[in-house]
Image: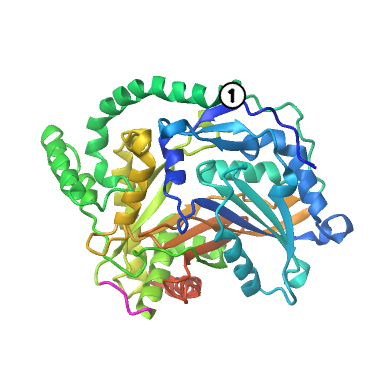
Amino acid sequence: MNDGVETGSGRLVRQLTGLDAEFLAIEDDRNFAHVSGLAVLDPSGAAGGAITLADVRGLVEERIHLLPPFRWRLEEVPLGLDHPWWIEDPDFDISYHVRELALPPPGTDAQLATQVERIISRPLDRSRPLWEMYLIQGLEGGLAATLTKIHHSVVDGVSGAEILAILFDLEPGGREVPQEPVAFETSDHPGSLGLLAKGAAALPGRVIRGISRVPETVVNIADVPPIRGLPGVRSLGVATGRVRRLVDRDRDPGELGRSGLTAPRTLLNDRISAHRHFSFGTLSLDEVKTVKDAYGVKVNDVVMSLSAAGVREFLRANDDLPDDPIIAMVPVSVRGDEDVGTFGNRVSAMMAALPTDLPDAVERLRCASAEMSVAKKHHATQPSHFIADATELVPPVVFSRAARVVSELGANSRLSPHFNLIVSNVPGPPMPLYMAGARLASHYPASVIMDGVGLNVTVLSYIDRLDIGIVGDRDLASNFDLLVEAMRGELAELLRRAPEA
């Protein structure tokens, strides 16, 4: 018996872009491309002083028309001739997607982290819409939590925040939800032969568009995250940089030198296992702003410096601290106002050196600030769509295999890593939020790692706090918790030395 919401009859909604499809292509039995968020809730002000599975399912059902990706499932094009499509799932069943579990007493943070690790170490079922939500009961202090897991092919950081805004309210009593369905262009499902014909018809146009994008893409190829570590790519970037310098003599040479950033090989840059480690913690946003003002830097500079301190301590503790700075990939949203409510991925990336080679906290902060300034200046010279264009250069029929090969090469010990880790600082809501009457106490992100990139540090602001979520490969090391501890210690040291600024 299906207790789900009736949503349609398998109509085509939209086709995935190359960038969306890449997150599907890199997956195997160890690499998973879903992103998650752990929302810790205080239900004391909710009806009955608790939040129940019925509450959460009812909330999602009430707002499902505002959450189109929650009803989409994949439809592959035969022979892989074109990128997949999203279709409305005619068999959508909310009881499959929204589930409940409970921690055994006493419900500590360590127990919660272990449960999150188990859930994020499992792939999503591609025969259904690519998301799951778990209501987790039994946390210490009478708290509860929800863990939302959704595939990166569906959302990026900003569109994920849009989903957060739909599921949460500004008042405990909720809000009136508009009942008009969100309008998306749809068409009847043409069947396998129809999709095959669509793919064949689209192929010539893809080839022409790919050729037209080659000149601009090659100029920026050394900054495309998935391929920047491959043999010859850096040399190509340097060569094209020299050409640009000859053509435009007014261009700042510093803007042309980012292709020379070389990531040293560390324990983080190996093949990953199927097992994840999750660490989480909180910093005071007010204290971070105090540091920002005292040293004349930006909040993001402080986050990068704290991340450098955490990674430095982690690598040092594992006898693997390189002499050179490590390289972080920093996701950057290029989503414009016209992209609101469209979901999918509209992202670019910056490459930045983290000063893990510097032992002094103040020196690290100043270096991190200078490095981010150069990285942003360089990023501003690039077309916002160059990473999306790079993913369109590979014909869909060989796309999946090519993406997996590139990912595996990033873990090849004979090659430089594409980059060492991912660091992301995501602005969150500055006001309290509520889910089914339960107040959101904190929200910890849990993002993606992959072969060659075994660590992800994501920071999300919420009211007066910075919530940190760290995902690492459990089989690479056992002491990822050192990162949060070191970040806290670094913040305290910068506050202590603020009069020196």
Check disc 1: other Cα within 10 Å, few if <14, some if 14-19, many if 20+: some
Give the percent coordinates (x, y) of residue 411. 32, 60
Position of 427 compared to 302: left or right? right
Q: How many numbered callouts? A: 1
Q: Position of residue 22 (x, y in %)?
A: 42, 42
Q: Is residue 189 above or below residue 53?
A: above
Q: Which amino acid does label 1 sit on?
A: His
Res. 412 visible in picture: yes
- Split into 4 quadrants, where in the image is the C terminus? bottom left
Instruction: In this rendered view, identify the residue nearer to me: 232 or 310.
Output: 232
- Residue at horizontal 68 percent and vertical 34 percent from the top: 66
Quarter assignment of residue 393: top left
**Is 383 placed above or below 265 here?**
above
Is 355 located above or below residue 429 in the figure? Answer: below
Q: Does the magenta stretch include residue 321?
A: yes
Residue most extreme to the right: 48
Percent from the top left, x then y, of residue 306?
Answer: 43, 66
Camera sees residue 384: no
Q: From which residue to which does the magenta span run?
A: 318-322
Instruction: Provide residue 19's location: percent of width, then percent of height.
Output: 42, 39
For this orientation, the residue located farthest to the left is: 246
Residue at 34% from the left image edge and 70% from the top image edge: 267
Q: Is the magenta stretch mostly helix, strand or loop?
A: loop
Residue placed under numbered mark 1 in the picture: 189
For the N terminus, the image quarter is top right
In-image side of 40 versus 374 (left or right): right
Q: In which quarter of the image is residue 302?
A: bottom left
**Does 374 sit left or right of 314 as displayed?**
left
Comparing 423 with 278, the one in front is 278
Q: Quadrant of residue 497?
A: bottom left
> Who is closer to the viewer here, 197 or 133?
197
